[in-house]
Image: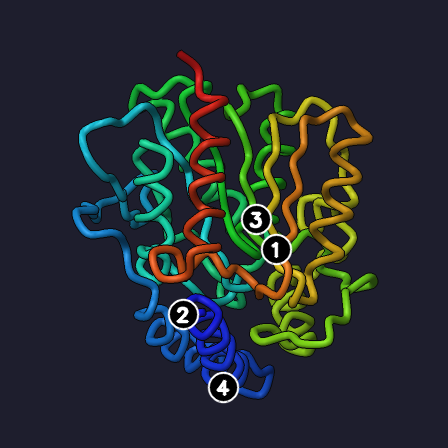
Amino acid sequence: MLQHLLESGLRQTMNRLVRPALHPAIPVSVQRTLISQAYRSSVPPRGCRFQANTLADRPVIRSSFGQATRGAVLYLHGGGYIIGSAATHKGLTGHLAKASGCMVVTPDYRLAPEHPFPAALDDAEAAWLALINEGFAPGQIAIAGDSAGGGLTIALAMRLRDNNQPLPASLTVFSPWVDLTQEALYSPECEPVLQARWTAKAAKLYAGQESLHTPLISPVFGSFRDLPPLLIQVGSQEILLNDAERLADAARKAGVKTQLEVFNSLWHVFQVHSGQLDRATAAVQTAGGHIREHLAG
């Protein structure tokens, strides 16, 4: 009963505070400030440690929990490629560090509109290569991300494969945004977080002069051959449900080991409520298990 009430309260909070902030009429600079305040409700587990430094000339936050560090997770934060940061996602990355037993490294990749495609992808690739230069074997690194960061996770894996670079041990995406054309958006009865008008504007700001059908912008249109094992989690109350299902279908058809989890009555990137909402905590635990399962050695 308490969890049901908490779930209802969190849904109302997202609908009343977060969704109105994600409006195309609000300047991006203001959205960044509003969302950074909203993420204060996402709290990392007690005992989690954070270290702020640089990686590949970009600011990063490294999240760790306990003594065990089996490997690293390169975590790419969400925010439509225009908002969000390593700091906004400390709650989620902290819980993922605890669940995976890995150090979670979250870069502040460059954002649009100041830095359109391929800046974010270039920064993600540079962070990946820098982790390898630090001494991590590719099989000791997983890549994960939420929303736009989920799409960026898939795009990075595709670019690494196409450039004959070593691939990560696994991929994990929460509510991935993989089709910026928005040609097949889902229409849930309730959508507490996202507005299609806002994501449409964010897509144009990110793509710049490039086509929204470009596979490294909208990975659902790309080739999934030879990609690492993939875990996809999505809520039923979000316009990106179809993105997740189409991503799973495309990956499976290409022979990728794929697990899709749809959480009824939950919203976009509900995992930020890990540590508060039991179903969010369980979802991150599953993600941590997926990461641990596929790490080398």
| Contact check, label 3 and label 4, Cβ < 8 Å | no
**Displayed quadrant of residue 193:** bottom right
> Which residue is under mark 3?
150
Q: Is mark 2 on a helix, strand or loop?
A: helix
Q: Earlier in the sequence, mark 3 or mark 2?
A: 2
Dot 4 corresponds to which residue?
16
- Which residue is at 52% across, 59% downward? 269
Earlier along the polypeptide chain: callout 3 or callout 1? 3
Instruction: Give the Cα separation between the discs numbered 3 and 1.
Output: 17 Å
Three-letter amino acid code at the position of disc 1: Phe
Alpha carbon distance from label 3 to label 4: 25 Å
Quarter of the figure with the N terminus? bottom left
The image shows residue 17, relative to residue 242, as above or below, that is below
Contact between labelled residues 2 and 3, with CB atoms less than 8 Å apart: no
Percent x, y for residue 174?
Answer: 55, 50
- Circle 1 SS class: strand
Residue designated by label 2? 2
- The residue shown at (65%, 36%) is 259
Distance in Å between CA atoms under marks 4 and 1: 21 Å
